[in-house]
Image (tube, grey):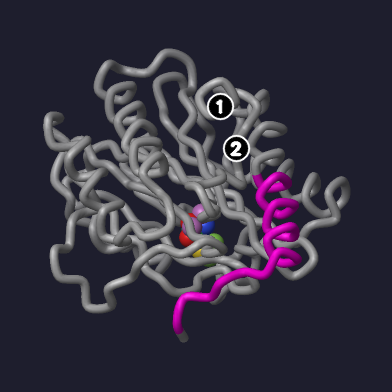
Amino acid sequence: MGVSIKTPDEIEKMRVAGRLAAEVLEMVDSHVVAGISTEQLNQICHDYMVNVQDTIPAPLNYRGFPKSICTSVNNQICHGIPNDKVLKKGDIINIDITVIKDGYHGDTSKTYFIGEPSIKARRVTEASQASMYEAIKIVKPGLALNQIGKTIEEYIAPFNFSIVQEYCGHGIGKQFHEAPQVLHYYEKRPAKPCILEAGMTFTIEPMINVGKRHTKLLPDHWTVVTKDRSLSAQFEHTILVTDTGFEILTLREEERALFP
Ligand code: MF3
Ligand code: CO
Ligand code: CO
């Protein structure tokens, strides 16, 4: 399948799904503290999605994923499965939320600090977030998709960090993962070149490691960790290409000042 162009009606549904996904992150914020387990965070988010929002948690049973959210702690890069592990001061945790509302998906994630982070943890987390913002800002019709990866790579280059290559952003809509693949590093000659058009919706979700870029899949078949056990941070937004540029469909209140 090629890259779908959403109709005005679909775009409105994507706006609703995106806002609801963002609201889950805002809701869970005050619960992300030392002493709570990732399973408790899963339960809080699940109940909110199902009982308050009337949304479907997209991860639950997606290709056999057993929980409603992904929680990736410290050296876990992505797709961490919530469990009884209790968060402690100094941890960082990415919470990745995907909701389905009215048949459409909204996908977003944020890395939280538990108490005061180490200097390294703060730097890698801030670099991941800022690289995502830099990439979002260049989005407009006519842009070659591989410029997103180029922008992230150029932003990360001055740091002694690395960019995960095995997992990428993705088109999103009726499907959780649609074309195109959105690489977070520069591919000069992409296998499937793509020029952005108004009405496309996709995620940008860079995973940045303190150490080397290489990944390892845990025996649970889901949790992706850094091979060298170094810290990893990620942020994700769902983006709409508009006639003049972009709209962040999963923008949180705390980010409003950055994108007025
Ligand atoms: N939300 C993830 C993404 O950003 C995908 C999670 S798949 C799951 O694409 F099955 F682990 F939930
Ligand atoms: Co995603
Ligand atoms: Co996600």
Q: For residue 231: magenta?
A: no
Amino acid, disc 1: Glu
In this picture, residue 184 sits left or right of residue 245: left
Please name the predominant secondary structure of the magenta segment in the image: helix
Q: Residue at x 35, y 67 (%)?
A: 195
Residue interval drawn in magenta:
2-21
Question: Residue 188 at what x, y percent from top left?
Answer: 13, 63
Q: Does the beta carbon at disc 1 come under 8 Å from ligand 3?
A: no
Question: Residue 60 at what x, y percent from top left?
Answer: 65, 65
- Residue wearing tag 2: 251
Q: Does the beta carbon at disc 2 come under 8 Å from ligand 3?
A: no
Query: Disc 1 and disc 2: Cα gap in Å?
Result: 6 Å
The C terminus: image quadrant: top right
Decide: marks 1, 2 in contact (CB < 8 A)?
Answer: yes
Kind of element beneath mark 2: loop
Q: Which mark is residue 156?
A: none
Amino acid, disc 2: Leu
Question: Residue 225 at what x, y percent from top left?
Answer: 30, 52
Q: Residue at x 83, y 49 (%)?
A: 53
Q: Residue at x 50, y 48 (%)?
A: 244
Kind of element beneath mark 1: helix
In the image, 136 versus 100, the foreground residue is: 136
Q: For residue 13: magenta?
A: yes
- Residue wearing tag 1: 255
The mark tally for this picture is 2
Residue positioned most to the bottom: 1
Question: Residue 57 at what x, y percent from top left?
Answer: 70, 59
